[in-house]
Amino acid sequence: MRIESGSSRCLHFVQHVIVVVLMSGINMQADAVDLLEIYHLAQANDPTFEASLHGYEAAQEKFPQARAGNLPTVTLTGNRNFTDARASFNGSTPNKQGVYAWTWQLQLTQPIMRPQNILAYYESEAQVDAAQAEFSQAEQDMILRVAQAYFDALVAQETVATAEAQLQAMQAQEAVAKRGFELGTVSITDSDEARSKAEQARAQLIAAQNDLETKLAEIEKLTGKPVAMLSGLKPTVVAPKPEPADVSQWVEQAKDNNPTVRAQFASLRAAGYTVTKAKAENFWTLDFVGSYGANYSSGNLTIPTPYETRVKSSVAGIQFTMPIFAGGLNSSHMREAVANQGKLSAQLEEARRKAGAEAKQAYMGIVNGVAQTEALQSAVESGESSVKGNQAGYRLGLRINSDVLNAQQQLFASKRDLAKARYDTLFAGLKLKAAAGVLSESDVQVINGLLGQ
């Protein structure tokens, strides 16, 4: 009777420890950081996203650069010099002469007909469109990287909490087995097995803690700030099903609206202008050229009589240029542009297929995740009933202590798997929107509203 009473007290101790572990986890959430905070920190500090932003800013300059080719250019040139020489005329004795001179000219050139420059203007518009789509992809990628790192860290938190509860339970079981062995009611094999399980649980806790530190380090890499605790999902959260429910609609939207697809389409459009621009290298050009300038010279080294000259001049006219032969360069440019156009066409088709496949895969991830979540929720409910049944059986002497602890351990594992399934399903929802090209900060805000445990 004394052994049974001690075991019962130990069981109540284990239950108390588990409750304390869970409550302490809830209390720690008061200082926890949520997903939206991590996202904003990543926006401000993530080097990968910053590089994408600067790349987009640089690409936007292609448009004013191309526009400049159709606008007038104004140049001012000038020089000033002094020439010292000895000159001889008609066999006379060489005399030393010095001539001082200066000149300046202001010239304006306005393109009238330069097909290459006009095509470069439209080409730059398409290139900027491609850069904008690539930046949209970078924004979506950052949301996915932040969410993935955040959810991975939450799973690691759940694993640590489970490992701590298991260690407490195994230590209590070890104490019961040791006491039973001392009283002669438990064999040495049972005592050794209990000690082995406790050590195994301790090793699992150490591994779980190391994994949590690794996952938090991934978040720090994104944000540049250390994070200790994250806000988890509320217990009652149910991941929403895809809307619209027809997977083909998501696939078609992804094939048309995915940022990578849009970037490839804009690049293909730019390549079309590049081909035409290469052909235009053989066309003539027409420019208006006007200039105004002046020059001065204090003398002339070619005549013996010194004199000054001052000249002011203005010129206006049309300049015609017709390329005749460039060594095959223009033809090579055209062949290169056509080949690149073919490459981009193939890459566009590849991007469309990939986007459609990603949308379908993410859609199925949501559907399967919802089903898995429902199954694990049932497993948790069954596990809770199993724990209560084993506790009742233990009090009546029908169950042993290890049955109760194993049931409790299984319940914790089911809860951990349920949390992971919820995170995976929510992440699949983000991936589906990303594939369709509609993922934005508002989706982060929606998920953030589900946090708070």
Image (cartoon, rainbow, N blue to C red):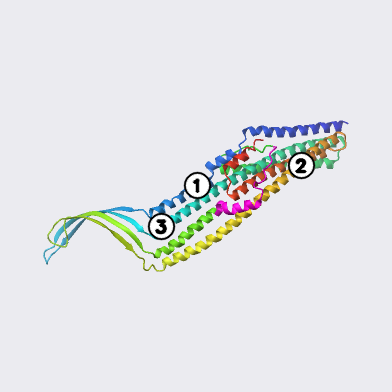
Q: Is residue 213 above or below residue 116?
A: above
The residue under the point 40% across, 53% down is 67
Give whichever of 194, 32 is nearer the camera. 32
Q: Is residue 201 in view from this perspective? A: no
Any magenta on residue 254?
yes
Return the residue at label 3.
118
Any magenta on residue 319?
no
Query: In the shown orientation, is residue 51 left or right of residue 170?
Result: left
Q: State the separation of the CA atoms marked 3 and 1.
A: 28 Å
Q: Could you say whether the residue bearing mark 2 is in a helix, strand or loop? A: helix
Position of residue 163 measured from the top left corner of the image (x, y, whole percent): 72, 40
Mark 1 crowd level (few <14, some 14–19, many ≥20, 10 Å Cα): some
The residue under the point 63% across, 51% down is 249
Q: Is residue 38 in view from this perspective? A: yes
Q: Is residue 352 above or below residue 32?
A: below
Return the residue at label 1.
53
Q: Are marks 2 and 3 in contact (CB under 8 Å)?
A: no
Q: Which amino acid, mark 1?
A: Leu
Q: Is residue 194 above or below residue 5?
A: below
Position of residue 292 measured from the top left corner of the image (x, y, whole percent): 25, 54
Numbered range of the magenta stretch: 235-261
- Circle number at residue 343: none
Position of residue 89 measured from the top left corner of the image (x, y, whole percent): 13, 65
Judged by depth in the image, the label closer to the viewer, 3 or 1, is 3
Q: Residue 425 occupies which quadrant of the picture?
A: top right
Q: Residue 446 occupies which quadrant of the picture?
A: top right
Dot placed on the residue nearer the N-terminal end, 3 or 1: 1
The residue under the point 55% across, 53% down is 260
Give whichever of 289, 6 is nearer the camera. 289
Q: Which amino acid, mark 2?
A: Ser
Q: State the separation of the CA atoms marked 2 and 1.
A: 46 Å
Return the residue at label 2.
378
